[in-house]
Image (cartoon, helix red, strand yellow):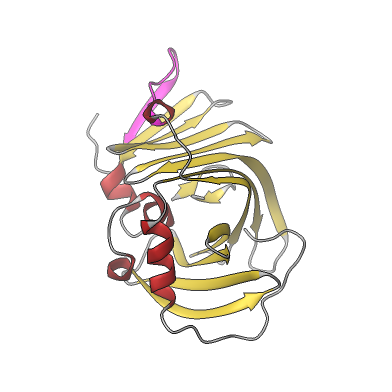
Amino acid sequence: MKVYRCRSALAGLLLAGLLPMAVQAEENPLARVESFLSATGTMSASFEQVLLDSNGRVLAESSGTMAIKRPGLFRWHYTDPEELLVLGDGEQVWNYDVELENVTVASQKETLAGNPAALLAGSGNVADSFSAEKTWRGGETDWIELVPREKQRDFRRVRLGFSGDTLVAMELYDQLGQTTRIAFDQILQNAPVDDELFAFSPPEGVDVITAGGLTP
C-alpha cells in the first residue's frame, strides 16, 4: 500500500546499518512466516521509516506507531515529520492527511490484494500470494525475502526481518526502484487491542475522496 508524501508503501531495517551476510538455506521459510502470523492475534509497536531512492540516497524519514489485529484490522499512525493516518477497518482503507485536510477511502479488499499490509493483517495463506526467494542472516536478524505471485502496481518484493519469533523489520521494494525500510521498537505481541482503535470517521470539514472500487 503506497503511503502519500514519500512515506512509500504500508508499511525498514535495523538503522544501525546491519548488512545482509551470506545467504543461508532454510528448509521452509514460508512456514516460519505462517507460524508467526498464526501465533499473532495482535501486534503493536513504534516504528521508524526511511525511504531510499534507487541509488540508496535518503529521500524521506518518518516515524510513528502501528497496530494490527488479525484478521483484517490495521493502523499506521505517522506523527513525524507530519501527521498521517492509514487505517484499515476490515471493509475500507482510510488515508487521512491531517495537514492537507483530506481523506481518501478505498475498498480494503481491492486495495490490499497481495499487499504487505494484507500479509500482516490478513487471514489468507501466505503461500497463495507470495513465494519465498531467499533467506539469510544479517547481524542478529533472520531475513526472508518474499515475492508476490501476481504482478503488483506498488511493489516488487518484501523482506521480513525476525529476531527469534518477533518481527522487527520490513523492507519494501517498489516498482520505481525505491526502498522503504521500517524498523519496529517497543513491540507488543498478543496484547489486548480494542477494536475502536481501528474505527474511523472523517473529521468535519475535511475533503473525502473515494477510490479503489468504492462509488461516491
Q: Is residue 115 visible?
A: no
Residue 204 magenta-drawn?
yes
Residue found at x 44% / y 17%: 203
Task: Tell me if 62 is positioned left or right of 172 in this view.
Answer: right
Q: Please report the residue visible at 37 percent of the width from the left and 53 percent of the height from the top.
A: 118
Magenta residues, dominant SS class: loop
Residue 123 appears at what percent x and percent y? 29, 53
Q: Position of residue 199 (x, y in %)?
A: 37, 27
Q: Position of residue 114 (x, y in %)?
A: 34, 60
Q: Determine which quarter of the picture holds residue 21.
A: bottom right
The residue at 51%/23% (across/down) is 101
State the residue in front, 55 or 25: 25
Q: Nearer the viewer, residue 54 or 162?
A: 162
Q: Is residue 102 visible?
A: yes
| Stretch of the chain drawn in magenta | 198-210
**For residue 113, above or below residue 31:** above
Quick one: quadrant of the C terminus?
Answer: top left
Q: Is residue 187 magenta?
A: no
Q: Please, is residue 151 above or below residue 181 in the view?
A: below
* Rendered residue at 59%/85% (across/down): 23
- Image: 122 above or below 176: above
Query: Taking 62 as reference, is 16 left or right?
Result: right
